Amino acid sequence: MDLDFYDANLYFGRPTREVYNPARDASELLRRLDGYGVHQALAYHVAERDVSPVAGNAMTSREIAGHDRLWGCWTILPPQTREVVQQGAEFFAQMKQQRIIALRAFPGLHNYLLQRTVFGKWLDEVSERQIPVLLSIEHGVSWPVAYSLLTDYPLLTCVLCDIGIWGVDRYTWPLLEQYPNVYLETSLVALEDGGMEAIVRRYGADRLLFGSGFPDRYPESAILQLLHADITLDDRRRIAGGNLKRLAEQVQY
Amino acid sequence: MHQPNLKEAFYALGRVPDCPVYDLHAHMGSYLGISFPRAEAPDMINAMDRAGVRLLVFCHHHTLHSPDIGNAVNVEAVRSYPDRLRAYCGINPNYPDVIAHDLDAFDQYPDVYVGLKMLADYHAYALTDERYRPAWEFAERRKLLVLIHTWGHSLYDGPEVVRKVAERYPRTTILMGHSCHGEWDKAVALVKDFPNVYFELCAVLDERGVLEKFVGETGSERIVFGTDLPWFNHHYYIGSVLGADINDEDRHNILHRNAERLLVRYL
C-alpha cells in the first residue's frame, strides 16, 4: 500500500454490550492493526466510555505504555467535580507524560452539558494548547450539542467521529465552513458515495482524518475506500495519516 | 509466485476482473433527506467502473416517492446504459391505479425490469396488505425478483410480515433489503425456512459480525450484495465483505455468483 495509515478512531477492551471480536488489550490491538495494514493509532480503552472516565483513562494509560505505535486519548468530565479535569498545568503535564495526545467527551452518556457554563476557561486553554477533542456522533453527542460547543469555543480543535450512516453533509459542511479547526473522522465519511471527494474539493483534504471505527466496523471498509478514492495521492496520504501526525505535533503541553 | 487473495487484489487495483460485482439494491436521483454528491446515472456508472461493478439493479427515488413521476425515469436510465443497469418496477400501494397501469405495461420493458421493488415502511402499508396483492400475484405468476425493504420490528416489513409473504408466494424470489435490520436471528430463520428468500447486505455491513453470522448459519449461497447507491460507497461495502471472517469462495458467491444465477434469465 502507498499509504501510511494512522487510525484516529478505535478502541480496545470489551464494551458493556458485546461486539464482534474486539481486541481485548493493546497488544492484541496492535496485532490486529498489522493484519489490516494500519501502522499506528490514537486509541482508548472503551471503559472510558462504558464504565467511568476515571477508571478508563487509567486503563488507557496503562495499556498503551511501552507501545510506541499507540497514542492515547482521555475522556473528560466537568471540571467542577474534579474527577478527571484539574485546573492548572499539571493535567496537561500528565497527558504528555502518559502519551495522551487528545481528549474525548461523551456528554450524553456521562450526564453533563458540553458548553461554556460547565467548562469555562478550561476549554479555552485546551483550544490554545491545540489539543484535539474527539466527539462521537453515534455515542452521546447530538448535532445541536456539537454546534453549541463550537459556538462557545470557535477555535477548539474538534474532531467529529462516527458521524452517522445516512449522509450528514447538511450538518457537517456548515461546521467545516465556519470553524477552521473542525475535522471529520472518516470511518463513516467513507461510507457516503462520493462524500470524501466532495469534501476534499470544497474544503481540502486537510480536514479529514482516517479512522476505522474498529471494533464496531470493519477497518478494511474505510481503508479500501481511501485507497481508491477519486482524489490525488497526496490528498490520500494526508487523510491516511499526515493530518493526524500534524495535529499531534501541534499539541502544546 | 504468490497468488494474491481477493483482499490483496482489491487493495491493489480497486477492482478485480475475475470478481465482478453485482449490486442488487440501488436507487438513483435526489432525495429529501440527504445531499448526494453522485446521484445521477453518469456519475453512478463512473463509481461502478472504479469498483468493478458489472451491473446495478435499482429503483429511482423519484419513482418510489412520487406517483407523478413514476417508473418512466427507471426506463430512461436503463435504456441510456443498457449494459450496466437494470431496474425494479417501483410499487407504491397508496396508488392502486398506478400499480395497475405499471403492471399492465411491465411486459413492454423486458430490457429494463428484473422484478418489483416494495418500500413498505415508507409507504405505510404492510407487505401483506390487500393493496399489494396484485403486485405479489403478478410476481408469482412470472417468478420475478422482488426487492423488499425490510427492517427489524417493523409492522410493515419486519420479519413476521416477510414470513407471511414468503409462505404465500413461494415461486417469487424475495430479496430482503437490509435483511430485517437488527433482528438478525429472525432473518436467518426466514432464509432457513424458505428457499425463495435471500439476505441482502445494504446497511448490514457497517456492523461487524452480522455477515459472519449469516454465512455461519446458512452458508453464502443465499446472500446478495447491495449498497443503496447513491447512498453508500461500493469500495466501503466491498471492504466489509473482504474484512469479514469468511473465505474467498464465500466472497465470490456474495459479490457476483449468486446474482449471476438469479439474473441469468434477464441478461
Image: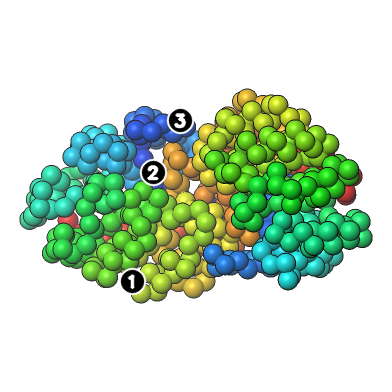
Q: Is residue B263 above or below residue A158?
A: above
> In this figure, which colouring scheme has been used for the structure?
rainbow
Residue B267 at x, y percent in the picture? 88, 49
Q: Chain of mark 3?
A: A
Secondary structure under tag 1 reads: loop
Q: Residue at x 83, y 45 (%)?
A: B137
Res. A70 in view: no
Q: Nearer the viewer, residue A95 or B165?
A: B165
Q: Nearer the viewer, residue B10 or A16?
A: A16
- Callout 2 crowding tier (Cα within 10 Å): few <14, some 14–19, many ≥20: many
Which mark, by number, is residue A179? 1
| Residue lying farthest to the front in this orientation | B130
Residue B103 image-quadrant placement: bottom right
Looking at the rendered structure, the kind of residue marked 2 is: Leu
Q: Is residue B186 above or below residue B41?
A: above
Which mark, by number, is residue A21? 3
Q: Earlier in the sequence, mark 1 or mark 2?
A: 2
On screen, residue B2 versus residue A101, left or right, reads right
Residue A124 image-quadrant placement: bottom left
Which mark, by number, is residue A10? 2
Looking at the rendered structure, the kind of residue marked 3 is: Asn
